[in-house]
Amino acid sequence: MSAWFSAYGSYVLIPFIAAAAGWGTNWLAIKMTFYPLHYVGKFPFGWRGVVPSRIPKFATGMVDTTIGRIGGLPAMVDAVDMDEVKSYFLDTATPMIAEAVHSLMRDQRRVMWENLPAPTKKLVYQVVEMEMREGMDSLTDDIHDNFERLLDLRELVVRKCEENPDLLNRMVFACAAKELSFLVFSGAFFGFAFGVVQALVWLYLPQWWVLPFFGFLVGTLTNWIALQLIFTPLEPKKIGPFVFQGLFLKRQQEISREFSRVFTEEVLTAKEVVHTLVHGQRSERTMAMLRSHISDIMEHKLVVQLVTQGAMGPEGYADLKDAALEKAIQYTEELAEDSRFNKNQAHAVQEMLHERISKQPPAEFQDLVRPIFHEDEWILVAIGGALGALVGWGQLVMLFGERLITNGAGLN
């Protein structure tokens, strides 16, 4: 037995080494796809994960394909209960009205305001509250009807992902964590299978190039085969008693649920929407709309308008409108940070996204994460091949180095 192991033990080790190489190359390929989040090293001898280095491309693609195909921003806006939004802002903002009016008037015409009788101030508060309630309906309807013109969803998603480079990674992991694990561990299985073939070929063809060549095959094919099993076949295909379909596509219901949760809870929040509306590239449109509605609210009551203009003058009245706009934006941003409100609205959009994504044809559904792997699949496969070839050289040197030195290229 000891003589047999001495003669053939090295051959027995080849499949196990190939399995470790298959696992290791696939693990490294996944790590290099998503990490590091920031460039490490010095160009050209450095690396940044494929996903973090191309956030604008992948994030925009996600918006244009997955979100765009299910109705885009209009579908998400329609999923929100606008009556609930109106009620929330009115109920929450009403207690702030007196504070806001008092602050505005003190800043603009402090002496005049301080000398007004308390009943007059109370009347002003009541008039403003009444006008705001009437104006809120018109404003929210206007925003709802023009939301796509006011908000650039691509800008919001890209900005959010660039501010937090790990966010896009988390969305992918939420969708494809099981598939990524399969990609890694299948490397060991396929590596062992290729290792058996490698050992047999080496036994009958002991040439110096055999082990590095098969190492290259192990590194490339384990990665490539695993990716094919994840995404193909697109449609369920029955072979005998078995039904085959890409692993990612089999979990469409589960994945659509998880993606919708992460997207609505971490990306498309009320806070981010308001921030983009007010500070984004299309903010001038939002400002023009708000300014128009504030003017309507302030000028709706002719008596109030004439009294205010008479007391403050035309320039002071214009300044008051600007100050009212700033105050309205300030309070809106504060209200949008309410976690309870965010959660309620996110749930409605989440359910809509889940329902529509889960019903997508497989060819469209796979685009949720497939472009991330497909974009640089050749790089990952090439890296796997290079590492596999190095492992093959290592096997040659460590297991058969003495025979290689003794006999040269042919190890018979």
Image (spheres, rainbow, N blue to C red):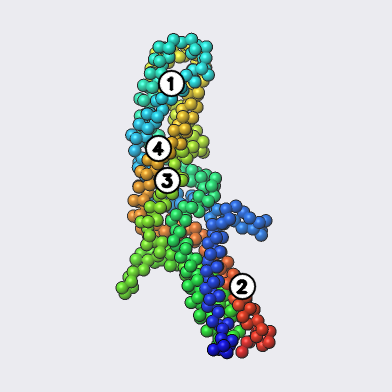
Front residue of 291 and 88:
88
Of the numbered discs 4 and 2, the one sitting upstream in the chain is 4
Residue beneath the point at 43% across and 67% down: 229
Separation (CA) of disc 1 from disc 4: 23 Å
Outermost residue on the front side: it is 2
The residue that label 4 is drawn on is 341
The residue that label 1 is drawn on is 98
Q: Secondary structure at mark 3?
A: helix
x and y, in percent, of residue 228 in the image: 45, 67
x and y, in percent, of residue 230 in the image: 43, 64
x and y, in percent, of residue 289 in the image: 44, 30
Q: Residue 264: which numbered mark, if any? A: 3
Separation (CA) of disc 4 from disc 2: 56 Å
Q: Residue 390: which numbered mark, if any? A: 2
Of the numbered discs 3 and 2, the one sitting upstream in the chain is 3
Residue beneath the point at 55% across and 79% down: 13
Mark 1 against mark 2, which lies toward the viewer? 1
Residue 194 visible in the shown view: yes
* Vertical position of residue 73 compared to residue 327: above or below: below
Q: Are marks 4 and 2 in contact (CB under 8 Å)?
A: no
Separation (CA) of disc 3 from disc 1: 34 Å
Q: Are marks 4 and 3 in contact (CB under 8 Å)?
A: no
Q: Amino acid at mark 2?
A: Leu
Q: Amino acid at mark 3?
A: Thr
Q: Residue 372: which numbered mark, if any? A: none
